Image (cartoon, helix red, strand yellow):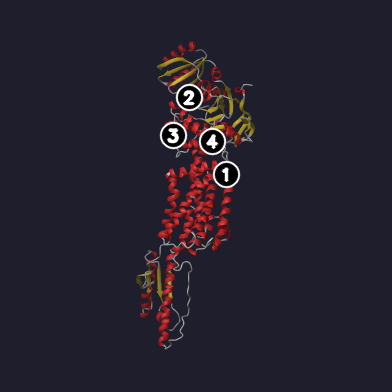
Amino acid sequence: MNINEQIIIETQSLTRAFGKTLAVDSLDLSIRRGELFGLVGPDGAGKTTILRLLTGLLKITSGSGSLVGFDLATQPEEIKRHIGYMAQEFSLYSELTVLENLRFFSQLFDVSEEDFSMRSERLLEFAALSSFRNRRADHLSGGMQKKLALACTLIHEPEILILDEPTTGVDPISRREFWDILAELYDDGTTVVVSTPYMDEADRCSRVGLMYEGRMVVCDKPEAIRSQLKGEVVRVRPDDWQAARAVLGELPGILETQSYGESIHLLVDSAEKRIPEIELALKGNGIGIKEIRPAPPRMEEAFISIIRGLAAHEDVPEKP
Amino acid sequence: MSIRHVFAVVRKEIQHILRDRSTLVLVLLAPTALMLLMGYALTMDIQHVPIAVLDYDRSSTSRDFVQQITAGDDLDLYAQVSSMEEIEALLMRGEIKVALVLAPGFARDIRSLRGMPLQIIIDGTEPQSGAFAVDHVGWRAEEFLNQALSAQMGALGVTQGVSQPIDLRVRAWYNPSLKPRVDMIPGLISMVLGFPALSVALTLAHEREHGTLEQLMATPITRAEVLLGKMIPYVLVGLVNVILIPLLAMLLFRIPFNGNFIVFFLLSAVFLFAIMGMGLIIGVFMKTQPAALALSFLLIFFPGFFMTGIFFPIASMPEVMRLEALVLPGTHYAIITRGVFLTGVGLDVLWPYGVMLAGLGVIFLGIAGLFFRKTLG
C-alpha cells in the first residue's frame, strides 16, 4: 500500500453533546496521510468542536476515533505528541520574544537543543520571521503572530497539523501568505486539517467537509462540490438592490438568489436564455443595471445552495 | 515528571513576571506598599483624647484630680461643663469621646477612705478611644488615690508599714513597653508575604482567558508539570519579599529580630509553598481573572486578616472557625513570624508549624492537581 493511501485520521459515529445539543453528531470521517482537509460551515456548525475532539481537548460523548493509530478516548497524550494544534484564539505568550516562544514549545515537545537550533532557523526563514526573532510577540503584526503560532505548532515536526480558523481576522495579504505556507507543507506531505469561514480558502484544499448543525453534510473534492451546483450563475449589479431583488424573485427560471454586497448572484437554469429576460424585467421596473454577466460557479454559491436545500423549512440567514 | 517541562514553564513564567509591569507590581511592590500603609495605620499611638469634665463637687480635691488626669499627652481637657445635657451635646457632635462626672462629695469620700465616686462616660461608637481613656483614667485615679491615702496616713502620724491597697506589677515579656506596634508588625508581615498568592490565582485564569492554556493543553505536558511550573516562580519571587519586608519592618517600625534569619527564611519558603497552593486551587476553579481575584480576597485575604490570630486571638473564636483557622497557612505562619521576631525561638519550638504548613501545601497542590484537567468544557 502506498504511504499516501494510509488513513491517518479516522472517526466512527464520533459524537459530542453539550447538554442536549449535539455539537458533533455521528461523524464518520477518514483522512489519508498527506491530505489538506478543509472544514467549512456556518458559525456554530461544530467545526471547532471536531478539531478539539481530534486533539483530545474535548472528551468524546460517544463513538470512537483514532489519529496516527492511537485511540482518541484512551491515548490522547500519545496523540498530542504527533500533532500540532493551533487554536482559533491562538495567542502566544505576548511578553516572550519570537525565539522564546518557539523554544518554549520545543521544550514541551522534548525537541533536543540541536534539533531546535536547526528547525527554528528553518521555520523562521519559512515564516519570514528571521529578522524579528528577538521581537516580543505582542509587538508583531497580526499576520506575523499567526505565522509565529504556526511555527510553534511545527517545531516538533508533527505528522498532522490541526488548525482552527488560522486566518480569521488577518489581512488579505497575510492570509494569502499563510496559505502559501500551508500549500508548501501540503507539498511536503504533512497532513493538514484546517477549518475556515472563507470559501476561497476551501477551494485550496484537497478535500472539503461541509458542516451544518453538527453533521457533515458534504465531503468531497472542491471541484466535485462546485459541480453539484445545479444551473448556472448570473451576476447582477443593479442600482437599487432591494427593488431588484423583489422583481427578480418573481421571474421564471431563477432557482435561487444570493446577495453579495451590492451584487446579486442568481442561480438560473440557463444563463444565455435568462439574461435578456432579467435585463428587460429590471428596466421595465425602472431599475438601472450597472453590470450583468454570467459568472463561474464558486464554492460559496455551492455551499449556500446546499445549506438552503437542507434548511428548506428553516430560516437560514443569508450571507451578507 | 519531566524536569525539562517544569523548567520550561518556570522560565517562561519568570520572564512573564519580569516583563509584565502589572504582575511585577503585584508580586514585588504591593507587599511593600501594604506593609507601609497598614503598618502605619495599625500602630498609631492614641494620643490627646478630648474629654469633658462635669464636676459636681467643686472642691480643691476634685480640681486637683482633674488637673492630674489631664496632665499628660494622653487625655486633653476639652471642656468643663455644668450639666449632663452639655455632655450629651458634645458627644453627639463628636467633639469629645469621653466625659468624666465627679459626684458631689468627691473630696469627702476620698478623705473618709470610702473610695472615689467617679463616672466615666464613653462614646460607644468608637470603643477604641473609650477603652484607652478608661485605662488611662484608671491608672491616674489609682495614683491619685494612693497619694491621697499616703497623705491621710501621714496626717494621722502613720509613716511606717503603710502598704497600698493594690500593688499589681505587670511585666510584658518580649514586648516590654507593650506597644501594639511590636505585636502587630510580625502578624502583618505574615499577611503581606502571602500576597503574591493572588498572582498565582490570576496567572492560570489569565492563560485561560488568553487561549494560551488551550495551547498548553494540546502539548504533552502533564498537569503536575504545569502546576509546579506555575507555583515555583512565585515562591522564588516571594522569597525576595521575605528578605525585603523584614528589613523594612526593622528599619521603619523598629521591630527587633531576635531569632535566626535562616530559620525564618526556611519556614517562609514552606509557607509560600502552602499559600501558593491555595492560589493554584483558585486558579484551577475560576475561569476568569475577576472571578479569581474575588475568590482570592474571599478565601485568602479576609480570612488571613481576621482568622489567623493576627488581630483576634484564635482561642476566642467559635470552634468551627478555630478549625478553619487551622487550614489557613497564615495561622501557622503568624505564630512563626511572632516567634522569630519577638521571642527569638528557633526550629526546636517552631518545627510543628513548619510541618503543618508543608502538609497543607501538599494537600492544596493535590487538590489543584485533582481538579485541573487537560480538557476543555
The image shows residue B21 at horizontal and vertical percentages of 42, 45
Using the image, tell me which numbered label, if any, was put on residue A112.
4
Residue holding disc 2: A180
Question: Could you confirm whether marks 2 and 1 are on the same chain?
Answer: no
User: Do we see residue A87 in this rendering?
Assistant: no
Q: CB atoms at circles 4 and 2 under 8 Å apart?
A: no
Q: CA distance from mark 4 to mark 2?
A: 28 Å
Q: Nearer the viewer, mark 3 or mark 2?
A: 3
User: Do we see residue A156 in this rendering?
Assistant: yes
The image shows residue A124 at horizontal and vertical percentages of 46, 31
Q: CA distance from mark 1 to mark 3?
A: 31 Å
Label 4 vs 2, first from the N-terminus = 4
In the rendered structure, which amino acid carries the disc numbered 1? Answer: Ala
Using the image, tell me which numbered label, if any, was put on residue B224.
1
Secondary element at image label 3: loop
Question: Chain ID for label 1?
Answer: B
Q: Nearer the viewer, mark 4 or mark 2?
A: 4
Question: Chain ID for label 2?
Answer: A
Q: Residue furthest left?
A: B79
Residue holding disc 3: A133
Label 3 vs 4, first from the N-terminus = 4
Q: Is B5 placed above or below B34 here?
A: above
Q: Residues within 10 Å of mark 2 (few under 14, many from 20)?
A: few
Q: CA distance from mark 2 to mark 1?
A: 39 Å
Secondary element at image label 4: loop
